Image: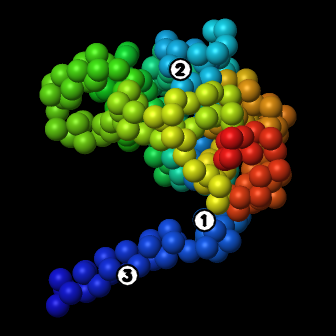
Amino acid sequence: MKTSIVNMKKFAKYLIRSAKKNAPRSLRYWVKVHNKNPASVEIETDATCNRRCDYCPLSMVETRKGRMSEELYHKIIGDLKVMNFSGNLSFHFYNEPLLDERLESFVAYASKKIPDATVIIFTNGDKLTKDRVHSLVDSGTGIIRISLHDSKTDNKITELLLDLEPELNKKIQLERYYEDELALMNRGGVVQLAESREKTDLRSGCDFITQLTINYEGNTALCCNDFFVTNGHGSLKDLSVAEIWTGSAKKRRNIFLGDYQSEICQKCAFG
């Protein structure tokens, strides 16, 4: 009897997830977006990256330099605490998070202030070691997602996984970009993708708008594809996260529903 009840509950949850996924975007907006906190917040604490991938805007500009002050970072986390934020928190935009030696302390601070959030570290894996995995997890990291850009790093990470304890292995996720298997974003038309890397189709609407992306200067981007942060929602040096989020609600609604009024969205979805 208990088994039947458990199976019925699982089936009901499956039906709800399926309905949310396949429902018209207008209905999904009311379920997923309207008056909701960000699904994820991305904070770029340091601007630097050690790679220049040809499918990334960094390959087209001079080296980015700069880092977020601890004071501003603490202010942003405080804002999220007031909002009872419980989504995903990560530390990237167009940077490599592991190059910031303050990362573990930032993770620990966030884990203490907003314990219901899930910390995800997105990294290219070049600087990842067994000791770093331990320190990140000990600080409160829930998931380490590694974007693999070449076979050399892939082999290195494979060896690392073999050396990790099983409970830490479970926290590692891999995504391979160098085998032309993934559709990519053209980053608002900034990068020209090879024909083999067919870009993601966003013509019906864009879920990226459910995230809040903050660069190292405290400026909020329109989404993760707004590399130059010229279409964003304002500066967190002047406004709170809640003010930024509620003030951009109409713009985000239109984009979620596929009403692309800005040039960057049009190039991203149709270009």
Among the two numbered marks 3 and 1 on one chain, the one whose residue lies closer to the N terminus: 3
Where is mark 1, residue-wise? 32
Kind of residue indicated by mark 1: Lys
Q: Residue 211 has which mark?
A: none
* Picture quadrant of residue 254: bottom right
- The local secondary structure at tag 3 comes to helix
Q: Are marks 2 and 3 in contact (CB under 8 Å)?
A: no
Which residue lies at the image location 68% right of the left edge and 28% below the top edge? 190
Q: Residue 54 has which mark?
A: 2
* Picture quadrant of residue 241: top right
Q: Position of residue 49 (x, y in %)?
A: 53, 16
Q: Residue 12 has which mark?
A: 3
* Picture quadrant of residue 232: top right
Kind of residue indicated by mark 3: Ala
Crowd around label 2: few <14 · some 14–19 · many ≥20 (10 Å): few
Which residue lies at the image location 73% right of the left edge and 36% below the top edge? 220
